């Protein structure tokens, strides 16, 4: 198999390349064209020196990747995590290319990352890291070139620092250089809940197609960060029962449905993890508990944490009829094979968690036009675009007789390839 980057064997990169090749075979594409689509357009690795709170010097490495910009400016989040590496960022950028194409957004795929643990830094240290990283990737970003957004380990405050650093270099305020900004800096209402909203919309549509509906469905959610917590609340609003949730410190379970208001209140009042909230029965503690929770009796599983959460062992113990991927790459290729054998439906990340980039696109539209839409307007647009994309995904799966993972990749790849053909290659 052709490998577009270093061939270092990062699981996320291997997984997305193999899925693109599988989709290419389904479409009958020439190898040369597929290699052009897989290869990232540009990869920038930067040094990020900073001053610690005690006055000593620290150092991190960062990356910004433009994967495919055939259909528009690059778009993708910035991840702060100690295990971030070049190939992971390339893989995530490739996923963004497929996601934007599947959603029919006029954007290309990008991603950024800094190999550092945000929990190990003071707020001032994070600001210094962010400002230096922004300065180093300055040649690649801009409202018409590449618009970063929050991802794992980053948030609206980090986006505010990035916007300010870029604006200082330009000499005037440029709100449109990032999305996921604070509302006070022309961020979009509805952005905080958008990814979780998209996950629940995907689950609702898929459950209806399976014939059981989301009302009354028992839901298990791995990860109770921004995406998972919003998915939990919005699922409950639609009549579902969230029977188990987890975070990095453990998992809790209640077959009658967890009291999310009590959980949120306890966390706001100082509980450090779900297992300290006193809500539900503790399934287990530590990261291993997340694996155990996949065996809980349920109808829908929403993995909303990091990649690789569901491997072969977890796939074999699942009782759910439907998996909806809220995280990027939470299911391994080996697990996909088990799920297919067990006829468990999976709605893949490139569609299921696309509510976030869709709302980011809407934020860009508002920034370009100097408009502010109400939260209801934004939420309605996100839901409408998710529904439209699900129709295309369903039709592709049915017409080709393939599962949703492959259908999503086929749909995204075909959209990108069509754009390549229409634009041509310069110089030809």
Image (cartoon, rainbow, N blue to C red):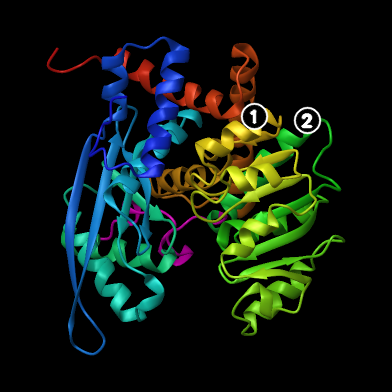
The mark found on residue 197 in the picture is none
Left or right: 98 in relation to 285: left
- Looking at the picture, tell me which residue is in the foreground, 307 or 387: 307
- Looking at the picture, tell me which residue is in the foreground, 189 or 128: 128
The furthest residue to the bottom: 54
Residue 177: percent from left, percent from top: 31, 52
Q: Can residue 415 be spotted in the picture?
A: no
Label 2 sits on residue: 210
Q: Does the magenta stretch include residue 229?
A: no
What's the residue at 24%, 67% (across, down)?
A: 131
* Image: 391 above or below 225: above
What's the residue at 71%, 32% (across, down)?
A: 342
Residue 56: percent from left, percent from top: 18, 85
Residue 176: percent from left, percent from top: 34, 51
Q: Which range of residues does the magenta coloring cover?
A: 171-190
Q: Is residue 177 magenta?
A: yes
Residue 116, picture quadrant: bottom left
- Looking at the picture, tell me which residue is in the foreground, 279 or 376: 279
Element at label 2: helix
Element at label 1: helix
For disc 1, the neighbor class at 10 Å (few under 14, some 14 to 19, many from 20) is few
* Quadrant location of the N terminus in the rendered image: top left
Residue 275: percent from left, percent from top: 68, 75
* Quadrant location of the C terminus in the rendered image: top left
What's the residue at 46%, 20% (across, down)?
A: 23
Left or right: 374 in relation to 76: right
Label 1 sits on residue: 340
What's the residue at 37%, 57% (across, down)?
A: 79
Disc nearer the start of the sequence (2/1): 2
């Amino acid at each position: 198999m052709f490998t577009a980057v270093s061939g270092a064997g990062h699981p996320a990169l291997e997984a997305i390349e193999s899925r693109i090749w599988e989709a290419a075979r389904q479409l009958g594409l020439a190898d040369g064209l597929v290699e052009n689509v897989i290869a990232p357009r540009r990869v920038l690795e930067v040094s990020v020196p900073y001053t610690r709170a005690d006055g000593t010097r620290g150092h991190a490495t960062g990356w910004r990747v433009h994967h495919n910009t055939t259909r528009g400016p690059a778009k993708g989040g910035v991840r702060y995590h100690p295990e971030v590496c070049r190939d992971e960022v390339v893989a995530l950028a490739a996923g963004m290319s497929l996601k934007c194409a599947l959603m029919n957004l006029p954007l290309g795929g990008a991603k950024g990352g800094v190999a550092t643990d945000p929990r190990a830094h003071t707020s001032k240290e994070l600001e210094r890291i962010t400002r230096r990283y922004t300065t180093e990737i300055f040649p690649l970003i801009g409202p018409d070139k590449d618009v970063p957004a929050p991802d794992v380990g980053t948030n609206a405050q980090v986006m505010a620092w990035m916007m300010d650093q870029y604006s200082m270099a330009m000499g005037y305020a440029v709100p449109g250089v990032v999305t996921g900004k604070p509302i006070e800096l022309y961020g979009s209402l509805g952005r905080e809940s958008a990814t979780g909203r998209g996950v629940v919309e995907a689950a609702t549509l898929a459950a209806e197609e399976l014939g059981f509906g989301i009302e009354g469905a028992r839901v298990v959610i791995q990860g109770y960060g921004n995406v998972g917590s919003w998915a939990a609340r919005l699922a409950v609003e639609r009549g579902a029962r969230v029977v188990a949730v987890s975070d990095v410190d453990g998992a809790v379970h209640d077959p009658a449905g967890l009291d999310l208001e009590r959980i949120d209140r306890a966390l706001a009042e100082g509980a450090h993890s779900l297992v300290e909230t006193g809500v539900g029965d503790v399934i287990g503690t530590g990261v291993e508990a997340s694996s155990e929770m996949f065996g809980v009796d349920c109808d829908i599983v929403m993995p909303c944490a990091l990649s690789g959460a569901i491997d072969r062992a977890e796939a074999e113990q699942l009782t759910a009829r439907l998996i909806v991927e809220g995280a990027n790459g939470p299911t391994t290729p080996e697990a996909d094979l088990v799920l297919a054998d067990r006829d468990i439906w999976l709605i893949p990340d490139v569609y299921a968690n696309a509510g976030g980039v869709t709302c980011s696109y809407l934020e860009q539209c508002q920034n370009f036009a100097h408009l502010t839409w109400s939260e209801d307007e934004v939420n309605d647009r996100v839901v409408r675009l998710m529904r439209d994309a699900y129709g295309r995904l369903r039709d592709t799966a049915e017409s080709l007789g393939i599962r949703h993972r492959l259908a999503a990749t086929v749909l995204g790849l075909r959209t990108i390839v069509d754009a390549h053909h229409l634009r041509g290659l310069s110089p030809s």
